[in-house]
């Protein structure tokens, strides 16, 4: 069997158990959900580069 098919079937069977995940970001000092952004802002959010700070 194909792994993608198994995964897709499993997701559709368990869909009733899933919850919606909201991603928030800070804009001008306020936390706002990304889903409320317009198309341009969503594109900017996807292009952001995250960095990992080196420990001291």
Image (spheres, grey):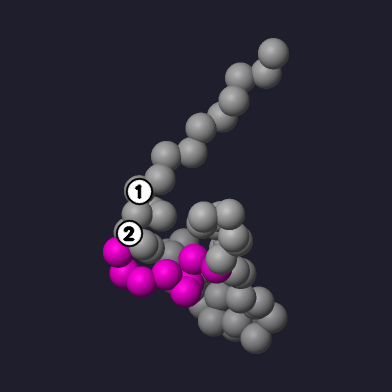
Task: Report whether 15 appears left or right of 9.
Answer: right
Q: Mark 2 falls on what kind of element?
A: helix
- Identify the residue at image location x=47%, y=74%: 36
Residue farthest to the front, as pictured = 28
Assign the magenta stretch its main secondary structure: helix
- At x 59% / y 60%, what residue is drawn? 30
Q: Viewed as shown, does residue 50 lie left or right of 14?
A: left
Where residue 5 sits in the image (x, y, percent)? Answer: 44, 71
Residue placed under numbered mark 2 in the picture: 43
- For the residue pair 24 and 30, the one nearer the viewer reads as 30
Percent across and percent down for residue 48 are 40, 45
Relative to residue 21, is residue 44 drawn left or right? left
Asked if one can make out residue 16 in the rendered structure from this viewpoint, the answer is yes
Residue 12 in picture, x, y percent from top left: 54, 81
| Residue 39 inside the magenta-drawn segment | yes
On the rendered image, what quadrant is the C terminus found in?
top right
Q: Nearer the viewer, residue 46 or 6?
A: 46
Disc on res. 47: 1
Q: Residue at x 56, y 75 (%)?
A: 11
**Residue range of the region highlighted in magenta in the rendering:** 33-40
* Spatial separation of the CA atoms under disc 2 and disc 1: 6 Å
- Circles 2 and 1 in contact, beta carbons < 8 Å: yes
Q: Is residue 15 above or below residue 7?
A: below
């Amino acid at each position: 069997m194909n792994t993608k098919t198994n995964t897709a079937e499993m997701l559709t069977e368990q869909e009733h158990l899933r919850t919606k995940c909201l991603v928030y970001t800070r804009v001008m000092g306020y936390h706002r959900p990304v889903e409320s952004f317009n198309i341009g802002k969503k594109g900017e959010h996807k292009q952001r580069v995250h960095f990992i700070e080196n420990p001291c």
